[in-house]
Each structure stands twice: as C-alpha cells, then as structure tokens.
Amino acid sequence: MWKPDSFDEREIPPMSAEMFSALVTARLRPLNDIEILGGKGLQLRLRVRGAETAAQLERSYERYRANPDALSLVIEQFIAALLNNGAQEKMGNEKFARVREKLLPRWMTAPQWMKKRDEGVRVVVRSMVQDLGAALILDQDDSFEYVQLDAIPAWEIDSQTAYDAALENLERRAADIPTLVNGEGIETLLLAHSPNAAAFAMLPSHRLDWQARIQGELVLGIPTHDLLLGLAREHPAFNALRAQIATDAQNSPSGLFEKLLLVREGELQLLSP
C-alpha cells in the first residue's frame, strides 16, 4: 500500500545538521584562503583571506535536504560564495528572480507522482492531504513544466521560498477568476473554471471565502485540474454530485481526483466515505 510519507523524495532522511556541518568543515580545512576559528551547530567562525566572518550554513543545509544528490554542488557553492563575497548567492537570486513570477503549485496524486518518478522526472512536491500533494510548475502561458529537485539548489533558494512565491502567484490569479454561483441556501453550488483552478483549494483565503458562501460544512471537488467545485455537505443532491465528480475524474483526459475534500476549521482533509 502506498504511504503518504513516501510521496516526497525529500522526506528520505538526509544526514543530520551536525554531520553536514562537520563535512563542510572538513572540506574547508585544506583551503589556504580559509581558516576555521570555531563553530557551533550550523554556524561557523572563519577567517577568509584575512577577514573574520560568521558563516551561516542553514540555507545550504536546507538546499541539501531538498536534494540530497546535490550535496557536493551545495558545498561547492557555499565555498565559492565565501571566496567571492557572496557572488554565487547573488547569481542564484538573479536566476530565481527570472522564474519567480512563473511559479505555481499544481495538485498531483500519488499515482501521478510515481509515474513521473518511474519516467525519471524528480518532481518537487510536498504532501498536502493523504495521497494528494502540491507540485511546483513553471507556467508558460499555454503550457507548463514541472520543477525538478535539482532546480532548488540551482536557484540558490530553499524549497519554502519557492512554495511561498508559487502561492503568492496563485493568490493573484485566483483574485481574477470570478466564482460562479448556482442555487441558493443549502443548495448553493460554487464553481471556478480556469487553467489550474483546482489549485485554488490550496489557498486558505479562498477556502475561507467559499466557506462563508456555504451553509454548514464546505466540501470541495477537484475532478480535473481546471475545475474547482464547492458545495455543502448537506446539499440535497450531495450523493449525485459526488458520483458525477468521481465519473468526471475517471473519464476526463485531464482527470485529477475522484474523492472529495472536506474543509474543517479552515484545513483540508479527505472526506470519509
């Protein structure tokens, strides 16, 4: 049986912060331009070309955790930044700035993730609700590409920075897409239809807005990537709508998820049968 904690390759336990710091220190010792004065945890006191400096390893360690295969690259970039007064970091930030506005989150099911993995595509994805995760994509207007694990260290950022940017971009897009409303009272049906509209369910502000329009508990359907449905759990046609969402998810070329999501206290959870 598939387990949620296997969804994200980054969840495979990497080396500890202490071991990472020790490895970096070992790589620094032979260098003529760097003298190690001391350190604790992920902080090092160094003398670089005669000038004392405090070096922070937190960001480098996060990049390593995001992509353990990039260990050597991460350490090399850290050393290069020390010797070039942060030039490598600046270059990385510029690289990220060029793609920042294109980042978006996109739902991905566990089977979709496993298929991509088997194809050799190492997608950046984090678990959200049981077998649903949020992948990162670069939007190219009429197409998109998945962000892969090696992009994070290459951009010289951590994964949280990438997700924060993606959600900010999604928030702006959601604000431009009107919510369509059908029915009233307990029979209210909410709908958003646009490219990647299903991802709006990831936004706490969007869930809060839709919850205010629904009587009782809010249930969300994401049968395809381009459709988000909202209805009350007590909707009189709930079972029929639930069956239709499952059918659409199974039969649509862009089918996404046949189950329903419940919004409870602002958080998403899988609706029990």
Image (cartoon, rainbow, N blue to C red):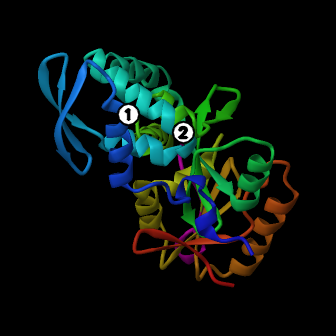
From this viewpoint, is residue 118 visible? yes
Q: Which stretch appears magenta?
A: 177-189
Above or below, 187 against 273 in this view is: above
Q: Which numbered marker is on residue 27?
A: 1
Quarter occupied by the N terminus? bottom right
Residue drawn at x 34%, y 19% as measured from the top left: 90
Residue 156 visible here? no
**Residue at numbered disc 2:** 104
Left or right of 229: which side holds 211?
A: left
Residue 184 is a magenta residue = yes
Residue shown at 88% from the left, 58% from the top: 251
Q: Position of residue 172 (x, y in %)?
A: 44, 38
**Residue at coordinates 79% horizontally, 60% vertically from top-left?**
249
What is the spatial separation of the Cα atoms under label 2 and label 1, in whole angstroms?
Answer: 37 Å
Considering depth in this image, is 1 or 87 the residue closer to the camera?
87
- Residue sticking out furthest to the right: 251
* 30 relative to 3, above or below: above
Q: Would you identify the image quadrant in which residue 127 lies?
A: bottom right
Please state which amino acid type lies under the numbered disc 2: Leu
Asked if labels 1 and 2 touch by Cβ distance under 8 angstroms, the answer is: no
Query: Looking at this view, is 259 or 59 the one in front?
Result: 59
Q: Position of residue 252 (x, y in %)?
A: 84, 53
Question: Would you call the spot at circle 2 few (<14 residues within 10 Å), some (14-19), or many (20 or more)?
Answer: many
Label 2 or label 1, whichever comes before in sequence order: 1
State the residue in front, 35 or 121.
Answer: 35
Inspect the image, locate mark 1, and give the three-letter code of the amino acid beneath it.
Answer: Arg
